Amino acid sequence: MISRKYETIVGLFVVGSLAALLIMVVIIAQQEGLWQERVAYRAVFKNISGLKKGSEVRLAGVNVGNVTNVSIGPTGETTVTFEVASRYRDQIRQDSKASIGYIGLLGDRSLDLTAGSQDKPIISPEGLVAAVEPLDLTEMLTRLTPHLENLQKVLANLATITKNMADSKGDFNQMLAEIRGVAQKVNKGQGSLGMFVNDTALYQSTNKFIGDLSSTQGLIGTLANDPAFRDQAKKSLAELNGVLTDWRQISSRLEEASKRFPEIAKKAEGFMDNLGRAGSGVRDLVITGQDFVSDADKVAEAAQKTWLLRRHIPKQQERTIRVERNIK
């Protein structure tokens, strides 16, 4: 009887354990959505930062599926295939984004999805969801290292400044003491600034001078309130503006001429070279012509002296002009 009793207790314990285990399996399967219909999608990343098969897929922070496959393509890009419960299918639209998230501060990676707009079409099964590349923590720290060094230098300088401010003999405290002394002298009416601030007569004279400017009293007030003077001043300013405009135009023309001056000088230099070359050629031509004429004269004189041609050349007749004068 006792052995049967123990057997019954053990049997009940085993059956209860199996029942509890079965219930736990059912609950876990229900939480994981093992019996739910799922829709597969894809996302392509350059770096998945440790995302792996079985990682959670979250939509607006809610677990809606898991990663089913991770593969590297021939171009080095990683294709992540994931499944989402079919009841969330209408949330995955053309403007949805897939990014790598974190479960906790230093926990496992997850695939985070954003819900799309209702006016965008739904992505079909096995469709591609636009991916947002994750921020590489190592690269971020590498970029921040120089800035952290500069920040450390700034903090060191601030520490030095505050130390000097705390020192009663430091430059900052001496400067404050000097400013305090100047303020005390001004309040006591010492110095030019103190006299100006504390002298009532000087204050009244200044107010009177300003009042004369606003009224017609005094030379400056008369000039400031004279319509003819204002018109003449406006006219003078207009003429000055015209002169400045003309001067700007002249300056621009001079600038343009100065830019063209090297080209003109180069052309003039070439012209002078050509003229020099032409002048030297003309001089040689004139000298050659003179020599030719001289040689021709010599040949003609020699021909006149030969006996064969001398009789055929007419002799020059001498002509005499007689001038008669009556001498009384």
Image (tube, rainbow, N blue to C red):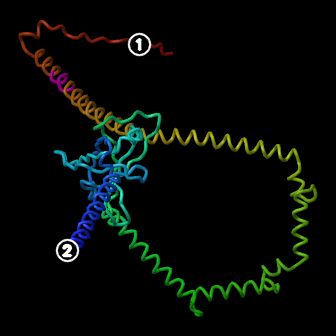
Left or right: residue 157 versus residue 110 is right
Nearer to me, 48 or 244 = 48
Q: Say above or below: 26 vs 328.
A: below
Q: Residue at x 89, y 67 (%)?
A: 207
Left or right: residue 258 versus residue 187 is left
Q: Secondary structure at mark 1?
A: loop
Left or right: residue 20 versus residue 217 is left
Whole-angstrom CA distance, mark 1 to mark 2, is 197 Å
Between circles 1 and 2, the one closer to the viewer is 2
The residue sitting at the front extreme is 1
**Dot 1 corresponds to which residue?**
323
Q: Are marks 1 and 2 in contact (CB under 8 Å)?
A: no
Q: Give the quadrant of residue 109.
A: bottom left
**Dot 2 corresponds to which residue?**
3
Q: Residue at x 47, y 13 (%)?
A: 326
Kindly identify the amino acid type of the residue bearing the numbered disc 2: Ser
Instruction: Please state, as top left, top right, bottom left or bottom right, where the N terminus lies in the image.
Output: bottom left
Nearer to me, 187 or 160 = 160
Kindly identify the amino acid type of the residue bearing the numbered disc 1: Val
- Mark 1 vs 2, N-terminal side: 2
* Residue 107, percent from left and from top: 33, 64
Q: Say above or below: 199 vs 112.
A: below
Chain part drawn in magenta: 290-295
